[in-house]
Amino acid sequence: MMLFSLSRSRKISIIGFCAAGLLFCLPNMVSKGTLEKFPAWLQHTVNLGLDLRGGSHLQLEVDLKAVNAEFLSNLLSDVRGTLRKENIGYLNLRVEGKDSNPRLFLNLRDIGQKDKVISIIKKIDNSLLTEVTVDGQVTISVDPIAAQNRAKKIIEQSIEVIRRRIDESGTKEPTILRQGEDRIIVQLPGVEDPQEVKKLLGKTAKMTFHMVDHGAQNTGIASSDSTMMDYVRSDEDSGRKIAVKNTISVSGEHLIDAQVSTDSQTGEIGVSLRFNKIGARKFAEISASSIGRQFAIVLDGKVLTAPVFRSAIPDGNASISGGYRSIKEANELALLLRAGSLPAPLKVVEERTVGPSLGADSIHDGRNATVVAFLLVSIFMIAGYSVFGLFANVALIFNMVLLFAGLSLLQATLTLPGIAGIAMTIGMAVDANVLIYERIKEELRLGTPALAAIEAGYDRAMTTIVDSNLTTLIAAAALYEFGTGPIRGFAVTTAIGISVSMFTALSVTKLITAWWFKDKQLETLPI
């Protein structure tokens, strides 16, 4: 009969799959010291989310208002240079409304050149809108749709840069997601004191490279084209100021990599920089014309370092050397450079810390809820289906084992909603067995022999089982795709639990039933 026609290879596969589940579930049940003795491929465990493990919650605000103002400010030098090159006379080139609705203004000497000016501005950036009044005042603003697209891109870039910076710090399984139009949520499981991460994220302004204004530096008074900035190389430099040109020579977005380096001849510690093609071209032009002069690397409105150009750098591979007291100091600068520059300023607007004791309470309550759900479901199955209910309960145990094995292999993060998904999976996992057993009862009422009734129960219920679970998997996939954070955790545990339940219901219980029936050879079934 079909029930006993399970091939030897299929029986071995079912047993092997269950054994593998036990093996990969085991790391979650041993101490950390014992786990370290396991081979690397067997050290994967389920990661606990912020609400279970404890940690830090930060809400960051992206300063989108400053983006357009900075964008227009950076256009000043381009507009000034282009208009002069085209011999177009103008007066009072300026930016107004930096906090809201930023615009660039200038006054034409000759109103007859307005069409030429509009054409020039469009060539500089086609996202700009230009208006000219009858008295020759030119207003340059950013197209609203282009500004909206730029804002969206800035949020995405900020999230990616924050993720890289946190990864560089060694924090595992952070949750970083967008909230609203200008907020970013950062959750750091296991980080009880987020000061180091906040310090890293605190370097929030856009990284830029500027030339030093030596004239202003000598007098100690900023000129109209420069700003006096704090030098934050070390504590010893506290209070020191450097005059930095306002014009951005190279944007930090063109920096590809930064690594600590050591001169093989002098042993001098330094930081090597590598730029992309655009950055390399700009850096080559600046270095060739600025040998012997200082340039400043600016982050968060403060100068990180201000080395001197010793020679032209034509290939975009520069080295900042000298003055580093230790590799650690050089590595801190390299880390900030390597992690990337944020396209807009950020500020921490909310900070919460979830204590590990609260997380332990959540785990305790979630575990109790899961155990109660398991016991109630087990009692129901035994009461309703006798020994067959016992088989379903054995399969349910393997369902839990395989679920945690899957979560471990995927390095998934378990949250409170994830525990809710596990508790729900316990109830849904026996649905397939209920369908099978009810079909067996129906066949027995029709007078079908015991073995044939079992065969019919498994065969005819399979389509219904697959269809019902498939719709649940589609819903879980939608939750994962469009959800964030804890919602995704719920979707992951539900999807894995449902997938595993089909295996345990259709394979594990079938194998157990086959062994039991072959041993008993009953003519009537206790169901």
Image: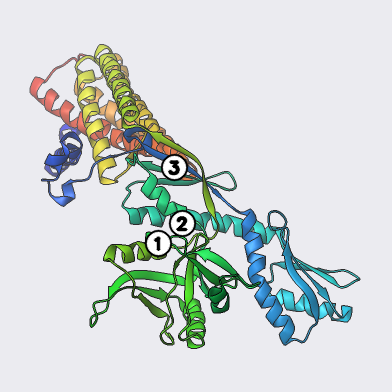
Q: Quadrant of residue 152?
A: bottom right
Q: Residue furthest right?
A: 134
Say which label, 3 or 1, has the lower sequence index.
Answer: 1
Which is nearer the eye, 334 or 167?
Answer: 334
- Check residue 323 in the rendering and tell me which mark sits there, or answer none: none
Which residue shows up at 34% across the image and 42% down it?
191
Closer to the chain start, of discs 2 and 3, is 2
Q: Is residue 177 left or right of residue 99?
A: left
Check residue 480 in the rendering and tell me which mark sits there, or answer none.
3
Dot 3 alpha-carbon crowd within 10 angstroms: few under 14, some 14 to 19, many 20 or more? some
What secondary structure is found at the residue carrying circle 3? helix
The relative height of residue 205 versus residue 257 in the rendered view (above or below) is above
Q: Are marks 3 and 1 in contact (CB under 8 Å)?
A: no
Does residue 277 show up? yes
What residue sits right under mark 1 in the picture? 336
Amino acid type shown at disc 2: Lys
Q: Position of residue 70 (x, y in %)?
A: 63, 63
Percent position (x, y) of residue 357? 31, 28
Residue in view at x 88 percent, y 81 percent: 112
Q: Which of marks 2 and 1 is nearer the N terminus?
A: 2
Amino acid type at image mark 3: Tyr
Are dots 2 and 1 in contact, CB under 8 Å?
A: yes
The quadrant where residue 146 appears? bottom right
- Visible residue check, residue 467: no
Looking at the picture, which amino acid does disc 1 mark?
A: Leu
Give the labeled residue for mark 2: 203
Residue 480 screen position, x and y as percent: 44, 42
